[in-house]
Image: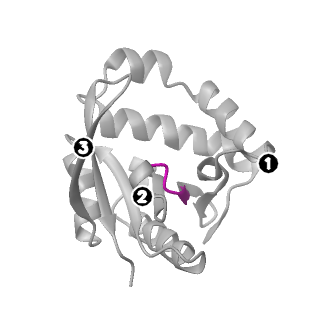
Amino acid sequence: MIRPMQVSDVPRVAEIHVFGWRMAYRGIVSDQHLFNNRLVSKSIEKFTQIINNSDTQNEMWGNNYVYDDGIVKAFLTIGPCRDEDKQDSYELGGLYVDPCFKGQGIGRMLAHHCEKIAKQKGFTEICIWTFEKNTQARAFYENLGYVHDGVTQIVQPFDAVGVRYVKIPK
């Protein structure tokens, strides 16, 4: 079941967030960052602040959902697109499935949930950013119908290339 993230979910979401980063971005982001800066304790602080700050300035970080079938296995962060040239678009800002539960269709369900909410809010396009070298994520999004729109940027502080994907949900 997909539901809004609650404070009680935060420790589990923090585990998924940190472990997901380490598994997906090793070789793209420095080990220094992944193992010395990406810490569960910091992630717990971040998500607790997001959930407790109901008047958040950035709606992106206030729209968090979890996939919970008795175990929180994944989470999703969505909201209006942060890109200047895509002010009328919605953004899938983060989709992390615990690597132990990948391949079960959970990521696909969460991506479709984003599309459903975007349509309900009147958005006609969804944007996603991922690292250029994250071939697994790129294949996943392409399989869902997202296309690279040719826009790239250097993602700091990682000094890695990010690529933007877009989709017009049906």
Where is mark 3, residue-wise?
152
Q: Left or right: 88 with respect to 13?
A: left
How far apart, in angstroms, are the residues tagged by discs 2 and 3? 14 Å
How far apart, in angstroms, are the residues tagged by discs 1 and 2? 23 Å
Counting residues from the N terminus, which is met first, the one under dot 2 or under dot 3? 2
Where is mark 1, residue-wise?
55
Q: Nearer the viewer, residue 5 or 130?
A: 130
Name the front one of labels 1 and 2: 2
Q: Are marks 2 and 3 in contact (CB under 8 Å)?
A: no
As shown in the figure, which amino acid type bears the numbered disc 1?
A: Asp
Counting residues from the N terminus, which is met first, the one under dot 3 or under dot 1? 1
Question: Is 79 one of the magenta-colored residues?
Answer: yes
Say which quarter of the image contains residue 63.
Answer: bottom right
Percent x, y of residue 12: 62, 44
As shown in the figure, which amino acid type bears the numbered disc 2?
A: Lys
Magenta segment boundaries in residue numbering:
78-83
Q: Label 1's element?
A: loop
As shown in the figure, which amino acid type bears the numbered disc 3?
A: Thr
Which of the labelled discs sits on residue 86, or is there none? 2
The residue under the point 32% across, 40% down is 24
Which of the labelled discs sits on residue 13, or is there none? none
Badge count: 3
The residue under the point 68% across, 43% down is 10
- How packed is label 2: few (under 14 Cα within 10 Å), some, or many (20 or more)? some
- Is 122 rendered above or below residue 130? below
Q: Left or right: 53 with respect to 18?
A: right
